[in-house]
Amino acid sequence: MSQLFGRSANTLALLTISVVLLLGGIGVGLAYAIQGSSYVTEVNTFKAQPVPFSHQHHVGGLGIDCRYCHTSVETSAVAGVPPVDTCMNCHKMMWADAPMLKPIRDAHKTGEAIEWNQVNKVPEFVYFNHSAHINKGVSCVSCHGQVNEMPLMRKTQTLYMGFCLDCHRNPQANLRPVEAVTDMDWHPDEEWKKKDKLVHHGIHPKKNFEVHQLTNCSMCHR
């Protein structure tokens, strides 16, 4: 009986397997690159808004505290979106007839809320509490970046699970005095660098609340 496969069959089989594995690896790498790209994560991508609100002007230029607009950030899971009445507190006297503020004026007259396009958002299956972070000394800057330098609001972090876990595993790096959480220009001095920041913020690694509990799945997936 003649041989079914020639001598080149082994070489051809190895070559085929190698090509399949290579293409598979390229496919996985490409998928990973796309998943981490700004096209998917929307990091540093500006979203169109009904009104081109500038944090650079209001926070950086005028020095308005974050909590003036985001009133519930210290007491609630959500930071809160300011109603048009908050905008009109100033703009009924300043730039009252500016064309770009027409949507604000119209909403104020009709009582309808402005539909802003959300820039920073975690998935619906993730529980995130702003007040829990703010009251422990985690600054707005840690997640939202230097908003005081943004003419238009943009996302600066992926807000993926890996980003959150990196902080939860090493929270010291993102802690500051509670009274400075909304200070965009705060930098640690030598005295602060010497403090045991975990104990200072009520997190006792060797007592009732260990740091590693921050990485427990139930912290965010409830």
Image (tube, helix red, strand yellow):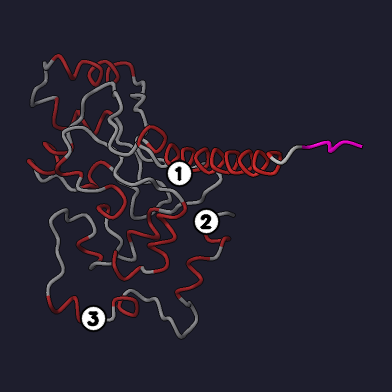
Which mark is first along the chain, 3 or 2?
3
Residue drawn at (69%, 44%) of the image: 10
Q: Pick the residue in front: 66 or 85.
A: 66
Marks 3 and 1 sit apart, C-alpha to C-alpha, by 32 Å
Q: Residue 81: x, y in percent?
A: 33, 37
Compared to 124, does 139 lie above or below? below
How many numbered marks appear?
3
Marks 2 and 3 sit apart, C-alpha to C-alpha, by 28 Å
Q: Pick the residue in front: 61 or 159.
A: 159
Q: Are marks 3 and 1 in contact (CB under 8 Å)?
A: no
Residue occupying the far front of the picture: 2
Q: Amino acid at mark 2?
A: Cys
Q: Pick the residue in front: 4 or 173.
A: 4
- Which residue carries the number 3 mark? 195
Which mark is first along the chain, 1 or 3?
1
Task: Look at the image and give the residue range highlighted in magenta.
Answer: 1-5
Residue drawn at (18%, 48%) of the image: 65
Q: Is residue 13 left or right of residue 122?
A: right
Q: Amino acid at mark 3?
A: Lys
Residue occupying the far bottom of the picture: 206
Q: Amino acid at mark 1?
A: Val
**In which quadrant is the C terminus drawn?**
bottom right
Image-quadrant location for residue 48: top left
- Which residue carries the number 1 mark? 122
